[in-house]
Structures are given as C-alpha cells and as structure tokens.
Amino acid sequence: MLRGLVKLTWLEIKIFLREPMGAVGTIIIPVAMFIVFGRVAGGMFAPGTVGGPATSPGTSAPAALGADGVWVRVILPVFAALLIALSAVISLVTIISIYREGGILKRLRATPLRPATILTAHVVVKLLFTAATLALLVLAGKRYYPSGVSVSVGSAAIALLISTWSVLSLGFIIASLVPTARFAQPIAAAIFYPMVALSGLFVPLASMPPGLRTVARLLPLTYAVSLLKGIWQGDSWFAHAGDVAALVVVFAVCVAISSRVFRWE
C-alpha cells in the first residue's frame, strides 16, 4: 500500500505541474499577493513617511494599523496562508471533478490500489504543495517583507497543514456534489471565499451581529484563522487546543459524510 501511495503521489505531482495555471494559482499567486501587499502597506504605513497616515497617540505605529501594526504583522501573513490553503482545496475539488467526469477515477478504482490510497495521494499532493508554498512565503518575507516579523516557522507550518488537512475533507464533499467539472471551481470559490469574510480575520467575531456570529462558529475557517493568528503571534498550542479539536471534528464529520456521498463515476 505504501509503495503504491508513493508512486501515485509522484504521478499526481507530475500531472499537476504539467498544467501551468494550476501551479501558478496554487503557488505563485499567494506569494505574489503577499509580497505586493506587504511592500505597499509597508511603504504607505512606514513611520515618518511624508503624507502617510497619522500614527496612534503615543506610538510610532500608524493609526490605521493599530498600535502594533497588526494589519501588516498579523492579518496579511495569515490571509496569505489562508489563500494557500484555499487554493489547495479548490484545486483538489477541480481535479477530482475532472477525474470523475473523464472516467479516470473509475479506472483507478479498478486497479489493485485501494480507494483510500487513491484519495490519500491527492491529499498528500496538496499538503506537499502547501508546505512548498509556505516555504516560498517565508523566503519572500525575509527578502521583501518590510515589517521584520519574527515567528516560529515550524509551528506556523504545522498550523497551516492542520488547517489545510481539515478543510480538504470538506473539499471532497463539494467535489462529489458538483454536477460537472466545469462548475467545480466557481462553486468551490463561492462556498469558501464567503467563509473568509466570516472567519474573524478582518472583522472580529465579537463585532458581528449575533446571527452572523453563530454562523461563523459553524465554519471551519473560523477555527483555522484563530489557530493561524494565534500561532503566528506566538501563542502556545495549549491556548488553541479548542481550535485544533474543532478542525479535527470537522475532518471526522466530513470524512464520514464523504464516504457516503463520494461518487467515483
């Protein structure tokens, strides 16, 4: 089983890289957005910039960013990490839908490989590209990012992989329910991107109306954002044990549902 998983994973990596737009959307775009927004924000909000925004009273940090420059230092990196995870999930939904519509999943299922091995290979590929994109994000940050943020890269990477792993399970449900491969990407985007708005990344949950707050508490991205923000700011894992537990529950529930609704053909 392990040998088959390794071979299939390597095959899927080569297939993925043969499609330039997939690699660009998954790897290049999140890193490019991080660099561009980081440099623009760093230049616009640098203390002492002529014509720049006013600073918070008693501090050298711009008022628009808060006393500690939270937008540049926390929200932007977490948003970039979230884009990495969502790109991986949307790519998974699209590929699974294309494979099913083209009869590839049906043919793979007829091989000696177990169905779990086939699906695991896709998850491993997405996690590998997530890790690779995060590595590029860190390298780009050291070279271009203006704010000099110091974080535990290892902990941030684990938090991102846990978040991606959990949300990928939801991707399998969406991939099974979309009618055709042509609608896979727009439907996945229409589901996941509104979750970002309700995740608490840009608007704190406490500031939301009670109804939206209740909806946000039911979404996996809310716990992913809480985990990523906390780890990025140096919080302990124990402080975010609830977020990790919620992501594990999401994974377990989605796997149980997808095992019943997933369609091979």
Image (cartoon, rainbow, N blue to C red):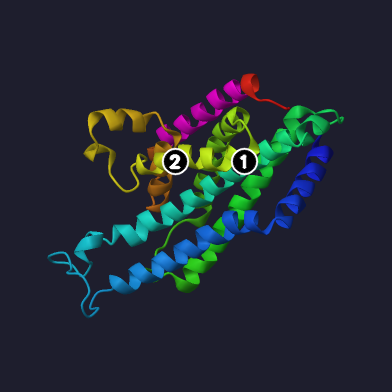
Query: Helix, strand, or loop for circle 2?
Result: helix
Q: Position of residue 137 (x, y in %)?
A: 52, 61
Per the rendered image, the range of residues in magenta is 241-258
Q: Position of residue 217 (x, y in %)?
A: 36, 30
* Residue 182 image label: 1
* Quarter of the image where the N terminus is located: top right
For image coordinates 57% across by 43% down, the residue present is 185
Q: Observer-nearest residue: 167 or 141?
A: 167
Residue contact between numbered discs 1 and 2, judged by CB atoms under 8 Å: no
Query: Helix, strand, or loop for circle 1?
Result: helix
Disc 1 marks a residue whose amino acid type is: Arg
Q: Position of residue 113 (x, y in %)?
A: 83, 31
* Residue 51 image label: none
For image coordinates 54% across by 67% down, the residue present is 139
Q: Is residue 240 magenta?
A: no
Q: Residue furthest right?
A: 112
Residue 211 visible within the image = yes
Disc 2 marks a residue whose amino acid type is: Ala
* Quarter of the image where the C terminus is located: top right
Give the mark, 1 or 2, whose residue is nearer the N terminus. Answer: 1
Q: Is residue 219 above or below residue 131?
A: above
How far is the residue under mark 1 from the one under mark 2? Answer: 28 Å
1 or 2: mark nearer the eye: 1
Q: Position of residue 253 (x, y in %)?
A: 53, 23
For image coordinates 58% across by 54% down, the residue present is 26
* Residue 224 image label: 2
Q: Residue furthest bottom?
A: 50
